[in-house]
């Protein structure tokens, strides 16, 4: 794990500044997938991830959520500014293009709208966790509508995504839940878990243009809640496309 984090620092410092967009995307996909394997986490993907510039909105369970998504779709995440202070991970997040927002400061929204617009025009996707924080116990929290403003302003396609972590026997894996722990405490819990399955489900995209951010947030939350409430695991669902990595 330490060696892989050091490799990320090297790539971001020595390769990213000189690499084209496609090479950076390939490196993000490879590094994130490799991280999951190092942590004994098998990814199960259901549904169609975005193939063009879009806004991905997902429930927030753990810091690992970012890399679950990045192992499938290279994108820039909107994240709380406190992540900057995480050991090494904060530096990696900043250098990889994370868009930081200070909670409770509405004046940040205007600058983020402009940043998201530039990324979408450039063909890049943006990811966000509209709950604003991780929920203790993995319960879905209310989606903050203000975080949907960039999607509405830029008339983006919004792809709801649901993330959950299970043990090999199909029971919820509480070791992945971030809760009130520090980053290092959470990492230690995940490392001690012998094996884990990360399920990432994508629903049909939502059109953000011409709608109000509150309505868009409500629809996105309902979509994610429906996916999280599904009883049958993806690999047992007949007739569905499932990719295991």
Image (tube, grey):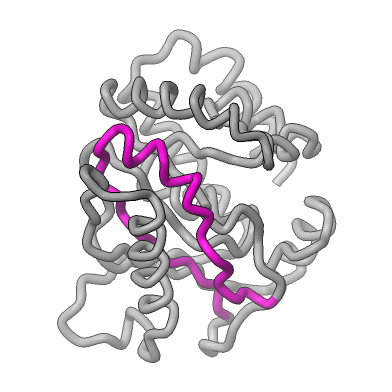
Q: Where does residue 141 sit, x and y in percent of width and height?
A: 58, 68
Q: How many badges with numbers are in the image?
A: 0
User: In this orientation, which residue lies closer to the viewer: 59 or 32?
Assistant: 59
Q: In the image, is 30 to the left or to the right of 38?
A: left
Read off the magenta span. Answer: 137-166
Q: Residue at x 26, y 49 (%)?
A: 211
* Magenta-drawn stretch contains 224: no
Q: In the image, is 194 to the left or to the right of 25?
A: right
Q: Residue at x 24, y 55 (%)?
A: 206
Quadrant location of residue 83?
Answer: top right
Tell me the quadrant of the picture where the C terminus can be found: bottom left
Does residue 245 appear in this view? Answer: no
Task: Check the image and report above or below for 206 versus 9.
Answer: below
Q: Where does residue 76 sit, x and y in percent of width and height?
A: 46, 34
* Magenta-drawn stretch contains 152: yes
Quadrant location of residue 115?
Answer: top left
Does residue 129 appear in this view? Answer: yes
Q: Residue at x 60, y 23 (%)?
A: 95
User: In this orientation, which residue lies closer to the viewer: 91 or 155?
Assistant: 155
Q: Where does residue 144 sit, x and y in percent of width and height?
A: 53, 54
Q: Residue at x 34, y 59 (%)?
A: 215
């Amino acid at each position: 794990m330490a060696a892989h984090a050091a490799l990320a620092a090297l790539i971001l410092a020595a390769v990213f500044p000189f690499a084209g967009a496609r090479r950076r995307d390939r490196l993000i996909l490879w590094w994130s997938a490799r991280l999951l394997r190092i942590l004994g986490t098998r990814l199960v993907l259901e549904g169609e991830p975005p193939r063009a510039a879009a806004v991905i909105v997902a429930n927030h369970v753990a810091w690992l959520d970012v890399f679950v998504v990045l192992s499938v779709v290279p994108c820039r995440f909107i994240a709380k500014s406190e992540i900057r202070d995480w050991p090494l991970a904060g530096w990696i997040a900043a250098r990889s293009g994370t868009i930081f927002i200070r909670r409770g400061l509405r004046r940040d929204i205007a600058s983020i709208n402009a940043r998201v617009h530039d990324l979408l025009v450039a063909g890049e996707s943006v990811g966000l966790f509209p709950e604003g924080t991780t929920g203790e116990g993995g319960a879905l929290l209310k989606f903050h509508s203000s975080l949907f403003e960039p999607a509405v302003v830029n008339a983006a396609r919004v792809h709801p995504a649901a993330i959950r972590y299970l043990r090999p026997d199909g029971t919820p894996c509480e070791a992945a839940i971030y809760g009130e722990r520090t980053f290092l405490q959470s990492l230690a819990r995940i490392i001690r878990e012998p094996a884990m399955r990360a399920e990432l489900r994508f629903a049909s995209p939502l059109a953000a243009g011409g709608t109000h951010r509150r309505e868009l947030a409500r629809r996105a939350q309902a979509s994610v809640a429906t996916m999280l409430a599904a009883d049958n695991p993806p690999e047992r669902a007949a007739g569905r496309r499932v990719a295991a990595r």
